[in-house]
Every structure is written in C-alpha cells, then in structure tokens.
Image: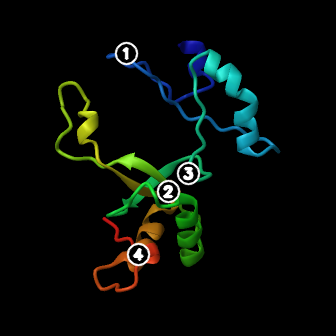
Amino acid sequence: MGTVRRYFHRLFPRTEGGMFYCNIIIASMRHPNSIRDLLAVHLRDNRLGLWQRAIDAEQVAEIGWLLYSTRHQDEQRLVRLLSNTTGEHIGARWRVIKTTTHNRRTGTSPQSKEVRAIHLECDANLTQRMKHKVARLYSSSSTNFPDGTKMC
C-alpha cells in the first residue's frame, strides 16, 4: 500500500475492507473516452474501473442537488444549459441523497431505500461564487427554472 500511495496520495486503507476508490489525474492529448476504451480489457481483467469526473478540476465541491430529477434527464444537456446560463463550468452526476435511513453502525443503507438525484458540482476554488450564481437561478422568488427542475 505504501508504494501505491506515493502515486495516489488520497488512497487510505479501509478498516472494514471492501472496494477502494481514489482520484487520479490523467493528462493526455487523447479524449478520455478513447483512453477508457484502450484500458477497458486490462481494467476488467484486474477487476478495476475508470470513471470520468463530471467536471475537469482537481478538487470538486457540491453546489446542491435537483429536486424531481429523473433518469430520463440528459445530464450533459443540463450541464451545457447551466454552464451557458452562469458562464462557469458546472458538472452534474447521479448520487445518493443523504437521508436518515443510513445505518451508522454498518455505514450502509438498504439499496431499495436509496434515493438518487442529479447533484451539481463545480471547482472547489469557486464554490461560494457558484453557489450564489446557481442560487439566483433557483431562488424562492424565481418563477422560471432552467430545465423546469427545482433545486435543493
């Protein structure tokens, strides 16, 4: 683990075991999808995965999540809409909404009770500015919401 941590500084052993997740930054002239396609067989053979982040930033912060979001919504279209409206780069991805059904002892919640929504993300260095920009779009006095979705 020590030699691997030299390259992945935020990789920590989990006392309860299970899957490890870490962030890596890959700089390349190729599109991320082509890199993922090239590595797909090797990753699958070694039971590894590679996912692209919703926004291209070293540290990402959550702005909020969208009420009434459904799996039928196109996250990429929503990202383009919000990024064009605010003039900033915004990412969107599906995540579990934190509820009180989480079991504190085991650190898990029943899969059937997990509620997911589209969460908006931005560069961590711009969090406050982005929260204010997005809050103006989704404030309680707003009557016209981008994409017809309200935010929490």
Q: Say which residue label 3 marks.
A: 54
User: Which one is earlier in the sequence, the residue at label 3 or at label 4?
Assistant: 3
Q: Say which residue label 4 marks.
A: 148
Left or right position of 140 against 43: left
Percent from the top left, x then y, of residue 44? 62, 21
Could you tell me the amino acid type at mark 4?
A: Gly
Left or right position of 42 against 129: right
Q: Secondary structure at mark 3?
A: loop
Percent from the top left, x then y, of residue 9? 55, 28
Please give the name of the residue rendered at 46% of the width and 61% of the height, measured from the top-left corner.
Answer: 127
Q: Secondary structure at mark 2?
A: strand
Mark 1 nearby-residue class (10 Å; few <14, some 14–19, many ≥20): few
Q: Say which residue label 1 marks.
A: 17
Could you tell me the amino acid type at mark 3?
A: Ala
Q: Secondary structure at mark 4?
A: helix
What distance separates the C-alpha of mark 1 from that of mark 2? 29 Å
Q: Say which residue label 2 marks.
A: 92
- Total numbered labels: 4
Cβ atoms under marks 3 and 4 closer than 8 Å: no
